[in-house]
């Protein structure tokens, strides 16, 4: 894989997803329906790969986003932190079509961070004394008990960025950042869909959120649906 | 008369020191924000936001600016955004002063159960375990008993645990209670709520 940091921008979603194979582990950015790489998610269903392991905080919701993978039956295993009202996941779990590994949200993020940072496992206080501890190694350090959690690495990461340059330096928008950077770092192949594609140098080096060292393919997708999960507003006169 | 939900969230707001970093759980705890004076405390949302502001004005809502409950919010001047790993480093690293969370059961020893009902639909863990284990102080807001009248302040939780020995204060419609290890100390009772009523509805010994 040496020498792949050139010509990262590809012309289509299909071209970006061409390397996907059955049985791969795919890490996908997004929190709920926010900051999801919507075009890549749709492209994976069209690509026709199956038996995937999906690592995602929510695995979609309201039948949208990654819920479409569940409905298409292309996932065999999900590592996530929250199901909530995601009926597609409840259904896939209930029928036995999909096995779910539930992991606390911060542990999920840190497992991917560790995966990308060359840390095979780490001790965390989260989940001590709960079902999360079951079957895991524990250790007392300075009088407090910790659980050993293992890193997550993916074959592919699907990432959504607001802005990318041609080297793959990324900026994110507001809370759409969420799991996107850690997912990118933890995968052998990180594919980014960006709202804006700019020449190198336009993003000041000090303003880069994620270095292009972690990015391998870039697709420019200017139009996004940006679904609302809960649209909560106040009326103008309610200003406080 | 027992506390209303608004009384409970108002009471919880009084526990927030000026200049502190606070994470409000999904649901009723989120309403605590409505009772904080402007600039009093900074609200952290675990999906990657510091300085969470009120809901946006109609027309200004952005699906990519949300709180942990996936509601559209705003960000206050001085606020910041970051990724999930850093957000939980803030929580786990002890940088969040206070978490105010909903609860299903709290034990006399301060154990918290708030993510799963035995035999119920699995909703997931989300950020609950990280917040409970990582925040420097945890306050629970909940109804005193279940809809079926079962105790929620108990000697030992029989719901799946979120974290052990973390809850420092429980606010219910009947009053404010502090887990002591052996039972609960009554910090205050809601107006008109008698000791007899609260004794009958609590699954562990009460002290004053």
Image (spheres, helix red, strand yellow):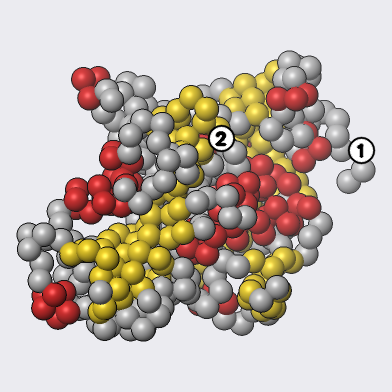
Tell which of B199 and A125 is nearer to you: B199
Find residue B59 and report its horizontal and vertical position in percent: 32, 21
Tell which of A91 and B73 is nearer to you: B73
Q: Is mark 2 on a helix, strand or loop?
A: strand
The residue to which callout 1 is attached is: A3
From where the camera sits, is residue B26 visible? no
Residue B48, above or below B98: above
Find residue B165 and report its horizontal and vertical position in percent: 47, 73
Residue A147 figure quarter: bottom right
Residue A216 figure quarter: top right
Residue A12, above or below B71: above
Residue B81: assigned label: 2
From where the camera sits, is residue A161 visible? yes
Q: What element carries label 1?
A: loop
Tell me: B13 left or right of A200.
left
Tag nearer the camera, 1 or 2:
2
Chain ID at mark 1: A
Binning the other alpha carbons within 10 Å of mark 2 as few (below 14), some (14 to 19) or many (20 upward) gives: many
Residue at x 21%, y 69% (from the top left corner): B144
* Residues at discs 1 and 2 in contact (Cβ within 8 Å): no
Residue located farthest toward the right when viewing the structure as drawn: A2
Say yes or no: labels 1 and 2 on the same chain: no
Residue at x 27%, y 23% (from the top left corner): A239
Tell which of A3 and B191 is nearer to you: B191
State which quarter of the image contains the C terminus of chain A: top left
Residue at x 56%, y 74% (from the top left corner): A128
């Amino acid at each position: 894989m040496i020498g792949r940091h050139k010509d990262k921008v590809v012309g289509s979603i299909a071209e970006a997803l061409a390397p996907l194979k059955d049985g791969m582990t795919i890490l996908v950015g997004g929190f709920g329906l926010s900051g999801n790489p919507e075009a890549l998610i749709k492209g994976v269903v069209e690509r026709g790969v199956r038996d995937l392991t999906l690592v995602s905080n929510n695995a979609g919701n309201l039948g949208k986003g990654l819920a479409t993978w569940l409905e298409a039956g292309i996932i065999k295993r999900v590592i996530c932190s929250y199901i909530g009202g995601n009926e597609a996941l409840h259904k896939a779990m209930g029928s036995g079509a999909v096995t779910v590994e539930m992991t606390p949200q911060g542990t999920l993020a840190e497992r991917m961070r560790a995966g990308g940072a060359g840390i095979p496992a780490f001790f965390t206080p989260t989940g001590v004394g709960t079902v999360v501890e079951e079957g895991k190694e524990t250790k007392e350090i300075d009088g407090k008990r910790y659980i050993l959690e293992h890193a997550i690495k993916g074959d592919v990461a699907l990432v959504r960025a607001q802005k990318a340059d041609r080297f793959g330096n990324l900026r994110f928008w507001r809370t759409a950042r969420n799991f996107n950077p850690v997912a990118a770092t933890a995968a052998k192949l990180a594919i980014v869909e960006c709202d804006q594609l700019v020449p190198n140098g336009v993003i000041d080096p000090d303003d880069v959120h994620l270095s292009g060292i972690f990015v391998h393919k870039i697709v420019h997708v200017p139009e996004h649906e940006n679904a609302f999960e809960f649209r909560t507003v106040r009326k103008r006169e309610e200003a406080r | 008369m027992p506390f209303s939900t608004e009384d409970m969230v108002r009471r919880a707001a009084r526990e927030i020191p000026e200049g502190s970093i606070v994470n409000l759980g999904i649901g009723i705890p989120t309403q605590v924000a409505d009772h904080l004076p402007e600039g009093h405390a900074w609200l952290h949302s675990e999906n990657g936001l510091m300085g969470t502001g009120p809901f946006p004005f109609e027309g200004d809502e952005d699906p990519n600016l949300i709180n942990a409950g996936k509601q559209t919010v705003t960000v206050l001047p001085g606020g910041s955004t970051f990724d999930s790993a850093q957000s939980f480093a803030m929580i786990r690293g002890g940088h969040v002063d206070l978490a105010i969370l909903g609860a299903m059961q709290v034990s006399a020893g301060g154990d918290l159960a708030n993510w799963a009902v035995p035999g119920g639909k699995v909703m997931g863990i989300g950020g609950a375990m990280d917040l409970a284990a990582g925040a420097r102080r945890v306050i629970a807001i909940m109804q005193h008993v279940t809809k079926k009248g079962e105790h929620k302040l108990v000697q030992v939780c029989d719901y799946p645990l979120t974290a052990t020995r973390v809850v420092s204060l429980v606010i219910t419609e009947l009053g404010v209670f502090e887990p002591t290890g052996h039972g609960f100390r009554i910090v205050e009772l809601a107006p008109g709520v008698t000791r007899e009523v609260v004794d009958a509805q609590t699954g562990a010994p009460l002290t004053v």
